[in-house]
Image: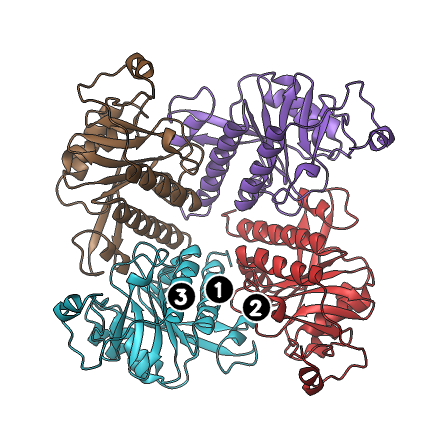
Chain colours: A purple, B red, C cyan, D brown
Amino acid sequence: MTAAALASAAFTSTLAPTSTPAWAIDAIIGAGRRMDARGWVPATAGNISVRLGPDRIAITRSGTHKGYLDASSVMQVDLAGRALTPAKPSAETGLHCQIYRLFPQVGAVLHGHSVAGTVLSMRGGDHIRFAQYEILKAFEGQTTHDVVLDLPIVENDQDISALAATIEPAIRGVLPLGYLIRGHGVYVWAGTMETALARLEGLEFLLACELERRKLAT
Amino acid sequence: MTAAALASAAFTSTLAPTSTPAWAIDAIIGAGRRMDARGWVPATAGNISVRLGPDRIAITRSGTHKGYLDASSVMQVDLAGRALTPAKPSAETGLHCQIYRLFPQVGAVLHGHSVAGTVLSMRGGDHIRFAQYEILKAFEGQTTHDVVLDLPIVENDQDISALAATIEPAIRGVLPLGYLIRGHGVYVWAGTMETALARLEGLEFLLACELERRKLAT
Amino acid sequence: MTAAALASAAFTSTLAPTSTPAWAIDAIIGAGRRMDARGWVPATAGNISVRLGPDRIAITRSGTHKGYLDASSVMQVDLAGRALTPAKPSAETGLHCQIYRLFPQVGAVLHGHSVAGTVLSMRGGDHIRFAQYEILKAFEGQTTHDVVLDLPIVENDQDISALAATIEPAIRGVLPLGYLIRGHGVYVWAGTMETALARLEGLEFLLACELERRKLAT
Amino acid sequence: MTAAALASAAFTSTLAPTSTPAWAIDAIIGAGRRMDARGWVPATAGNISVRLGPDRIAITRSGTHKGYLDASSVMQVDLAGRALTPAKPSAETGLHCQIYRLFPQVGAVLHGHSVAGTVLSMRGGDHIRFAQYEILKAFEGQTTHDVVLDLPIVENDQDISALAATIEPAIRGVLPLGYLIRGHGVYVWAGTMETALARLEGLEFLLACELERRKLAT
């Protein structure tokens, strides 16, 4: 990146830009390929981020296909969502930043659109309840299948600040599973990308099971 | 290609043939592999094209499997569907040409057969309605999920001119989604192959969601 | 293969053994990988063959996984099903031979077990009817979607001679689609392996569509 | 591994540790990739083992993703489940050991979580009955489709000793299919990893068929 390119970018943050470390780019590219292979990031849906420091994350840029990411698909923003490298952030960057602000121990955030999550979220209600699944043990703090956990569903909103204000009460406190935006998709997070991907797989497995159960005759 | 081979081909266009550029062949082969991996081009179904100029496109030949294309699988036609290189065009080439004629900004057209699209198209009606899906924002001109968009369904016809005449009124005007031929499959298009593939993924995601929703008990 | 190994094999045919040509082994291995990727050859199910001459075919041996074939997985038999190379033929070799005997123009036969075919075959009836699908044009002699074609279902039987006797009347005459054995799977064939694979994909697409249609509320 | 690392590990078995042979690591890694490709080991679910000798097995460690195993993901335990190499065994190691103790001819055990198995197991009942499937012949001792076989379902329990006590009567005697833990997943086993994988594929195929059948209108 040239000094001219940097100078011409509309930076609004006071943090100095730095180049994104290779581990962060590799983690984001790998997660995108995995999510694409499962069909969870159709078109240019979804976004993927990792924490680079207390006030800085690396995140996929607006409009990229998550199955075909490269280094140029990744940008940096501060925790207010302001660009630290010259690119246009996706509107949903604000939802990633919200999670990093609320949970200092979080190192990676994933957002995908699956058929199961989308369909179930459009059935009404403000949560999906999971109980008696062994895979619930894949979520933080869970030691048994003999538990009831709720995945919150929030209403979709193109005003990301308004959406974030709806999400915040739903995810404060003990919330191991993530959340679902109606007609839209899931957000999950964890200390590392590896754990975040495992959470996403666990949650999508639960959603797939619930969808199948609702198709069976009683 | 030898001069003899060219001379023996039954050219009916007055445009001079030229060799197909590598970027066009690569775009078509790559799209075919992607569509095949998703199960959208069974047997020799589907066809794929890119615009080479104002009056010329590159398109898959008749009878090829879209998951195993190579340079010999691609031919050139003019916008009336007449062969510019020596090979037999698929009957549906005319539907590609129609889109390129109607929309000068279009650079790529994709046609696939998915289970979801085929099954939904055979349920009757002249459209499938999508509403409240975040992924609708993947389509041109859409800025919110809070919208209602209809995918037109037209009756299948082996007379491609007759079929094209049915399609034209359905796709003139503002039509971001594409169209569906009953018992047959979808057509989508965009300025570039990359965007056309994203549109196809977005549309197939919507069709998969709708199919799942119709299986659920009320 | 040593002379001793050959001598010790229980040959019952008077045709001399020859080594299987590389094209035949490659065609069989490739078809197996393709069928495995689609989930149509679970466990050691399925079998795959190509014609080597008027009275000789190459076919997968008994008990092999079709996704992991190599040259040692392929043997030769005559059209009565007798081993021409030292290995144990699968019991269903007789059904392949029946097709090659009945149809001299056939060059490849595929048998797979799909979830859709198995489930639909167990619903009763002696055929599955397909109509108004564009993909019906992938089958020999079909030029329009506006046609009704029946896929015969025959009762399963571990006595392969008895099973073959049941199949023969169902497949003599004009039968472009193949046949289905109840609770078991489909057989398809064509002049070449490439065409046989396209037929299998077309038929499995039709079966998948029919299965989905039967899950929808009326 | 250094002598110090070995000395500091909390060994409780009197068997001497040895390095795990490459064939065992390769078999476990390969099985994990296969199961992951099919979607049967979401998050860190599932576990995989092979027998190394009369009183020793190699098994995946606790908390690993089965699609991304390497040599460090595999540990050794004795048939009482005590670590022979320095790592923490998964809680479910005890269920693997139970199978190896009960069946001296068993060489490999697989445990996975599929959507079909999980959903069907949560429908109540203490078994799933399979009949008239050709693929039943993939299971030991079966020579015909014309048979009725039951897959036992046991209640899930985080107390592995209690769970094992529930399982034992269900799997003693003639039990070719494996067993299913409610809301949890299947266990299968065989003389070799190749055969165990074929059994798992056969069983998952049967479960997928049964799930589809229960979605169809009568």
Label 2 neighbour load within 10 Å: few <14, some 14-19, many 20+: many
| Residue, disc 3 | C26
Characterize the local packing of mark 1: few (<14), some (14-19) or many (20 or more) Cα atoms within 10 angstroms.
many
Question: Where residue B80 sits in the image (x, y, percent)?
Answer: 77, 76
| Mark carried by residue C205 | 1
In the image, residue D92 above or below residue A46? above
Chain bearing mark 2: B
Relative to C88, C123 lies left or right: right
| Residue B18 or residue B176, whichever sits in front | B18
Please, which chain is the residue tagged with disc 1 on?
Answer: C
Residue denoted by label 2: B45
For label 1, the SS is helix
Please report contact status of discs 1 and 3: CB closer than 8 Å, yes or no: no
Compared across the picture, whether A55 is left or right of C140 comes to right
Q: Secondary structure at mark 2?
A: loop
Residue D152 location, x and y as percent?
24, 41
Q: Which mark is residue D14?
A: none
Q: Chain of mark 3?
A: C
- Residue at 69% in and 18% down: A55
Q: Mark 1 against mark 3, which lies toward the viewer?
A: 3
As measured in the structure, the alpha-carbon distance from the residue carrying label 3 to the one carrying label 2 is 24 Å
Q: In which quadrant is the N terminus of chain B drawn?
A: bottom right
**Residue A85 lies in quadrant:** top right
